[in-house]
Amino acid sequence: MRSLGLNEEADALSGEIGKSEYYIWPENWSAWEFFNELSDQWLFAPMGGAIGLNGSVVLDYVKLGGMKGKKAQAIYQDIRHIASGALSAWREKSKDNQ
Protein backbone atom coordinates (compact mmCIF):
# COMPACT_ATOMS: atom_id res chain seq x y z
CA MET A 1 0.00 0.00 0.00
CA ARG A 2 2.87 2.37 0.66
CA SER A 3 3.84 1.95 -2.99
CA LEU A 4 0.51 3.58 -3.80
CA GLY A 5 1.36 6.53 -1.57
CA LEU A 6 -0.95 5.47 1.26
CA ASN A 7 0.00 5.80 4.91
CA GLU A 8 0.20 3.50 7.96
CA GLU A 9 -3.56 3.12 8.27
CA ALA A 10 -3.65 1.66 4.78
CA ASP A 11 -0.83 -0.73 5.70
CA ALA A 12 -2.94 -2.02 8.56
CA LEU A 13 -5.75 -2.71 6.12
CA SER A 14 -3.50 -4.80 3.89
CA GLY A 15 -3.49 -7.80 6.21
CA GLU A 16 -0.63 -7.26 8.63
CA ILE A 17 -2.86 -8.09 11.61
CA GLY A 18 -1.96 -11.81 11.74
CA LYS A 19 0.73 -11.32 14.40
CA SER A 20 -1.57 -12.09 17.35
CA GLU A 21 -4.55 -14.25 18.14
CA TYR A 22 -7.94 -12.63 18.49
CA TYR A 23 -11.16 -14.07 19.82
CA ILE A 24 -14.57 -13.06 18.58
CA TRP A 25 -17.77 -13.90 20.39
CA PRO A 26 -20.14 -15.99 18.26
CA GLU A 27 -22.83 -13.30 18.26
CA ASN A 28 -20.33 -10.89 16.68
CA TRP A 29 -19.04 -13.26 14.01
CA SER A 30 -21.42 -12.13 11.21
CA ALA A 31 -20.53 -8.47 11.73
CA TRP A 32 -16.82 -9.35 11.72
CA GLU A 33 -17.18 -11.27 8.45
CA PHE A 34 -19.01 -8.35 6.83
CA PHE A 35 -16.40 -5.92 8.17
CA ASN A 36 -13.57 -7.98 6.69
CA GLU A 37 -15.32 -8.21 3.34
CA LEU A 38 -15.54 -4.41 3.31
CA SER A 39 -11.86 -3.84 4.06
CA ASP A 40 -11.34 -2.13 0.70
CA GLN A 41 -14.11 0.41 1.30
CA TRP A 42 -12.28 2.81 3.62
CA LEU A 43 -12.48 6.51 2.84
CA PHE A 44 -9.32 8.57 3.27
CA ALA A 45 -8.94 12.29 3.89
CA PRO A 46 -7.15 14.25 1.15
CA MET A 47 -4.11 14.74 3.38
CA GLY A 48 -4.07 11.05 4.45
CA GLY A 49 -5.61 9.06 7.21
CA ALA A 50 -8.69 6.90 7.17
CA ILE A 51 -11.92 8.69 8.10
CA GLY A 52 -14.38 5.80 7.98
CA LEU A 53 -16.01 3.15 5.87
CA ASN A 54 -18.10 4.17 2.88
CA GLY A 55 -21.51 3.97 4.56
CA SER A 56 -23.56 3.60 1.40
CA VAL A 57 -21.41 0.67 0.25
CA VAL A 58 -21.69 -0.94 3.68
CA LEU A 59 -25.48 -0.65 3.57
CA ASP A 60 -25.65 -2.01 0.01
CA TYR A 61 -23.41 -4.91 0.96
CA VAL A 62 -25.59 -5.77 3.96
CA LYS A 63 -28.67 -5.75 1.71
CA LEU A 64 -26.83 -7.83 -0.88
CA GLY A 65 -26.16 -10.34 1.89
CA GLY A 66 -29.92 -10.82 2.13
CA MET A 67 -30.45 -9.03 5.43
CA LYS A 68 -33.54 -6.91 5.89
CA GLY A 69 -35.28 -4.85 8.52
CA LYS A 70 -34.03 -4.92 12.10
CA LYS A 71 -31.37 -7.54 11.37
CA ALA A 72 -29.88 -5.35 8.61
CA GLN A 73 -29.97 -2.31 10.92
CA ALA A 74 -28.25 -4.27 13.69
CA ILE A 75 -25.45 -5.62 11.49
CA TYR A 76 -24.95 -2.16 9.95
CA GLN A 77 -24.55 -0.66 13.43
CA ASP A 78 -22.20 -3.47 14.47
CA ILE A 79 -20.00 -2.83 11.43
CA ARG A 80 -19.94 0.88 12.25
CA HIS A 81 -18.85 0.08 15.83
CA ILE A 82 -16.03 -2.15 14.60
CA ALA A 83 -14.90 0.56 12.16
CA SER A 84 -15.01 3.17 14.90
CA GLY A 85 -12.84 0.96 17.10
CA ALA A 86 -10.38 0.47 14.25
CA LEU A 87 -10.16 4.23 13.67
CA SER A 88 -9.57 4.86 17.38
CA ALA A 89 -6.82 2.23 17.49
CA TRP A 90 -5.12 3.71 14.40
CA ARG A 91 -5.25 7.21 15.88
CA GLU A 92 -3.72 5.95 19.14
CA LYS A 93 -1.00 4.14 17.22
CA SER A 94 -0.34 7.28 15.21
CA LYS A 95 0.02 9.35 18.41
CA ASP A 96 2.43 6.78 19.86
CA ASN A 97 4.60 6.94 16.73
CA GLN A 98 4.99 10.73 16.85
Image (spheres, rainbow, N blue to C red):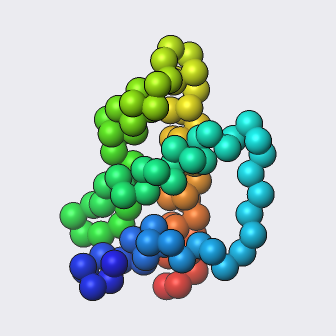
Q: Quadrant of residue 25?
A: top right
Can I make out residue 27 in this image?
yes
Percent from the top left, x then y, of residue 93?
56, 74
Q: Give the residue at x 54% y 77%.
A: 16
Question: Among all residues in the image, which is located at the extreme left?
Answer: 46
Of residue 78 and residue 62, the one placed in the foreground of this image is 62
**Left or right relative to 51: residue 76:** right
Residue 16 against residue 32 in the figure, above or below: below
Q: Give the residue at x 59% y 41%.
A: 31
Percent from the top left, x then y, of residue 40?
36, 58
Question: Among all residues in the image, which is located at the extreme top?
Answer: 69
Residue 84 against residue 94 in the figure, above or below: above
Can I make out residue 51 in this image?
no
Locate the N terminus by quadrant: bottom left
The image shows a total of numbered marks equal to 0
Q: Quadrant of residue 54?
A: top left
**Left or right relative to 6: residue 69:** right
Q: Quadrant of residue 50?
A: bottom left
Residue 22 against residue 11 in the figure, above or below: above
**Left or right relative to 52: residue 90:** right
Q: Give the residue at x 74% y 36%.
A: 27
Q: Give the residue at x 27% y 85%.
A: 3
Percent from the top left, x then y, of residue 36?
51, 54
Percent from the top left, x then y, of residue 75?
56, 32
